[in-house]
Amino acid sequence: MSADLLGRLADLVYPRRCVFCHRILRAEPGRVCPACAKQLPPAPEIHGRGEFYRKAVGVYAYTGPVRESVIRFKFEGCAFYAETYGWLLAEAVSRELAGKYDLITFVPISPQRRFTRGYDQAKLLAQAVGRALGQPVIRTARKVRNTERQSCLGGVAARRANILNAFRPWRPERWAGKRLLLIDDVLTTGATVSELSRELLVYGAASVCCGFLAVTPKS
Ligand SMILES: [Zn+2]
C-alpha cells in the first residue's frame, strides 16, 4: 500500500483537525482551516520589546483561538501541534529573515519544567521550523534556574529581574561567530529573549534574530 493511500486512510480514521478551532481539515491545501487562515489576527508590532536581538518576526496575535491553541500545546499535551506551528513560522521566517541567520536555535525551559511537561515546547517548535526549511537546529543554552512563569509577573522590570542569569551557554564553540535565529512560542515583553540574546552575544554569537508563533497585544 502506498504511503499516500495509507495517509488518506489514516485521515479517514483519525481526521486531522485545525490546531486553532478543531474543525476537521478536509483535503484542502494548507495546514489550518480556511476560516482560520482568513480570520486569525496577525502578530502585532514587535519593535520596542526587549533588546539585544536585531530583527524578529511573529505569525499571529496571542489572542482568542491562537491563545487557546498554544495553551493546549504547552500545558495539555498537544505536542504534535509543533508540526503545524513550525510550518506557519517557517513561512514567516523565509519571507522576512532569509539570509539573516546561519543556525536555528530555541529558548530552553528548565529541567524541572521539562520533567513535569514531558517536552520542551520551543525545542519542538524550532525542530519543526528546521524541518520545514531544511535547516539544522542546535541547542545553544541551558536554563539553569527554574524561574517564575513570566506570564504571572506584572511589569517589565519584574520580568527582567526574574530571568536575569537564568541561562548558561551550551557548547559555544559550535556556534560562536554564527548568526542565530532564536525560536520561542510566545513573545510578551521580550524580557526572556533579551536575556538569552545577551548571553549568546557575550559568548560569541555574531547576531541574534527571533521568530515567534504568537505575540501578545501591547498592554
Ligand atoms: Zn481553524
Image (cartoon, grey):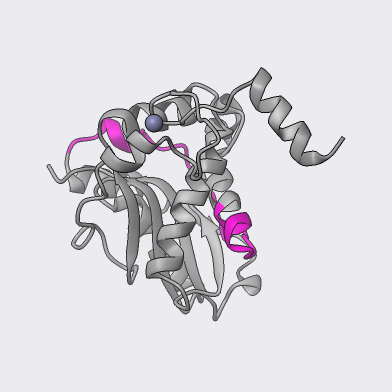
Q: Quadrant of the N terminus?
A: top right
Instruction: Give the left or right position of residue 28, taking residue 40 as reference.
Output: right
Instruction: Give the left or right position of residue 70, taking residue 156 as reference.
Output: right
Q: Nearer the viewer, residue 180 or 68?
A: 68
- Is 182 above or below relative to 121? below
What residue occupies the far top of the structure in this picture?
Answer: 13
- The answer to whether residue 144 is visible is no
User: Is residue 5 shown in magenta?
Assistant: no
What residue occupies the far right of the structure in this picture?
Answer: 1
Q: Residue at x 36, y 33 (%)?
A: 148
The location of residue 132, given as percent across then percent down, is 59, 56
Q: Nearer the viewer, residue 142 or 145?
A: 142
Q: Nearer the viewer, residue 100 or 98?
A: 98
The location of residue 112, given as percent across then percent down, is 56, 32
The location of residue 72, given as percent across then percent down, is 45, 25
Q: Tell me which corner region of the image, top left, top right, bottom left or bottom right, holds residue 65.
A: top left
Q: Nearer the viewer, residue 25 or 96?
A: 25
Q: How many marks?
A: 0
Which portion, as a residue range, is magenta? Answer: 129-154
- The answer to whether residue 7 is visible is yes
The location of residue 133, given as percent across then percent down, is 58, 62
Q: Quadrant of the C terminus?
A: top left
- Is 65 above or below relative to 198? above
Q: Quadrant of ligand 1?
A: top left
Instruction: Give the left or right position of residue 24, taking residue 67 as reference.
Output: right
Q: Residue at x 44, y 53 (%)?
A: 89
Q: Residue at x 44, y 23 (%)?
A: 22
